[in-house]
Amino acid sequence: MSAPTMGYAGTPYEPTWTTKQVAEFLGLAVQTVYNLRSAGEPDFPRPRKQGRLNAFIPSEVAAYRAKVLNIQDEGVTR
């Protein structure tokens, strides 16, 4: 993941991901990402609209992934 760059007027800017990129990062099908969004999954990152595209902030997607993996690890008994 790349660090945020400086955008307009010196504000930090983080590049965004498409739904397909989010699906690849999470290891899910694109349809599953759509389903999680439409089901109102409370911890799933909220996309920003860029025209007609849904744009996700990579750091929010990574935080969601870390939280989900942590929850799954806690439920595993070894």
Image (cartoon, rainbow, N blue to C red):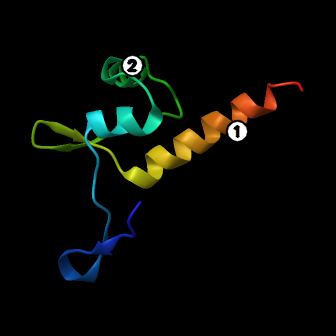
Q: Nearer the viewer, residue 39 or 57?
A: 57
Relative image position of residue 44 (x, y in whole percent): 47, 34
Residue at (28, 59) in percent of width and height: 15
Q: Nearer the viewer, residue 10 or 69?
A: 69
The amino acid beneath tag 2 is Thr
In the rendered view, does 53 fall on the left or right side of 2?
left
Crowd around label 2: few <14 · some 14–19 · many ≥20 (10 Å):
few
- The residue at which mark 1 appears reads as 70
Q: Residue furthest bottom?
A: 10
Disc 1, SS: helix
Vertical placement of 52 versus 40: above or below? below
Looking at marks 2 and 1 on the same chain, the residue that comes earlier in the sequence is marked by 2
Residue at (25, 41) in percent of width and height: 18
The C terminus lies in which quarter of the figure?
Answer: top right
Q: Nearer the viewer, residue 39 or 15?
A: 15
Residue 55: which quarter of the image? top left
Relative image position of residue 48 (x, y in whole percent): 27, 44
Crowd around label 1: few <14 · some 14–19 · many ≥20 (10 Å):
few
In the rendered view, does 72 fall on the left or right side of 18?
right
Residue at (65, 36) in percent of width and height: 69
Q: Residue furthest left?
A: 51
Q: Residue furthest right?
A: 78
Relative image position of residue 8 (x, y in whole percent): 18, 76
Vertical placement of 66 versus 24: above or below? below
The amino acid beneath tag 1 is Asn
Marker disc for residue 32:
2
- Label 2, label 1: how far apart the Cα atoms are: 20 Å
